[in-house]
Amino acid sequence: MDLPVHATVSCYDGPVGKSSYIIVDLVNGEVTHFVVKTKDHGREFLVPLDLVKDSDRTVILLDCHKDDIYQLRPFKEEYFYGYDAYEGSPPVPSPGMTASYAMYHPYRTAKAGSQGTRSHPSLTPLAVNKGAGVFATDGPVGKIDEVVIDPETHHVSHLVLRQHNLLDKWIVTIPVAEIERAEMDAIYLKIDKAAVKALPTIALNKYPWEG
């Protein structure tokens, strides 16, 4: 399927906007969404591929009405990684596509045999946002950097928090079993800061192009 950027996006009742980004899942190498920037309000929304009826180099036809677009999840660039965020060269969705129009879900997998990688069937990857604050019972512990997913079920198993500065460097992987509740930009845990610090860190896989 050809999903160009800057293409006119049309619904049953007419054009709704232009495509602006293509969203890629690096775990399975597949495009999951594209982003439409609406012409009426300038807002951007994530459009899943199952809404695409047809497309060519200039037009993407959707199997919905314009009002349906405004019910989709809003696109926020800070929830995703850009091409330049990775070491090496991650794949772009199609040959010749400008890399700056590709955005990537913040997904990673755990190495085989890692302890405690059981996923949570009710917590989908899109329900957990990069940059969301993570709060222990006694206060904040950091922000989500990546999400560890089960490559077979695509359910979330861990949240990844990283800290890099001149004085400190650490990584924490929090199993989803320790989540009390999840909101769009905040994750609340069942445990306190001391328990978070004591959690074992699971080994994470690198992508083939990473050093």
Image (cartoon, rainbow, N blue to C red):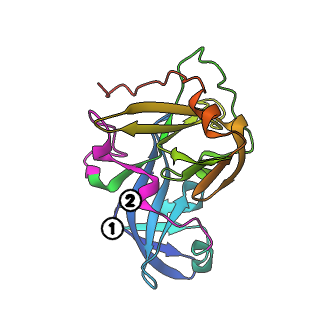
Q: Is residue 112 visible?
A: yes
Question: The residue under label 2 is which amino acid type?
Answer: Tyr
Drawn side of residue 113 relative to residue 58, left or right? right
Residue 158 image point, x, y percent: 60, 34
Question: The residue under label 1 is which amino acid type?
Answer: His
In the foreground, 87 or 31 = 87
Residue sitting at x 33%, y 44%: 92
Q: Which residues are magenta?
A: 71-99
How packed is label 2: few (under 14 Cα within 10 Å), some, or many (20 or more)? many
Tell me which label, 2 or 1, sits earlier in the chain.
1
Asked if residue 159 is positioned above or below residue 82 in the image, the reply reads above
Secondary structure character of the magenta stretch overall: loop
Q: Which residue is mark 2?
A: 21
- Asked whether 146 falls inside the magenta stretch, the response is no
In the foreground, 45 or 121 = 121
Residue 8 image point, x, y percent: 39, 72
Asked if residue 56 is positioned above or below residue 109 in the image, the reply reads below
Residue 156 image point, x, y percent: 63, 38
Q: Which residue is mark 1?
A: 6
Residue sitting at x 64%, y 32%: 195
Residue sitting at x 36%, y 59%: 4
- In the drawing, what numbered circle is on residue 198? none
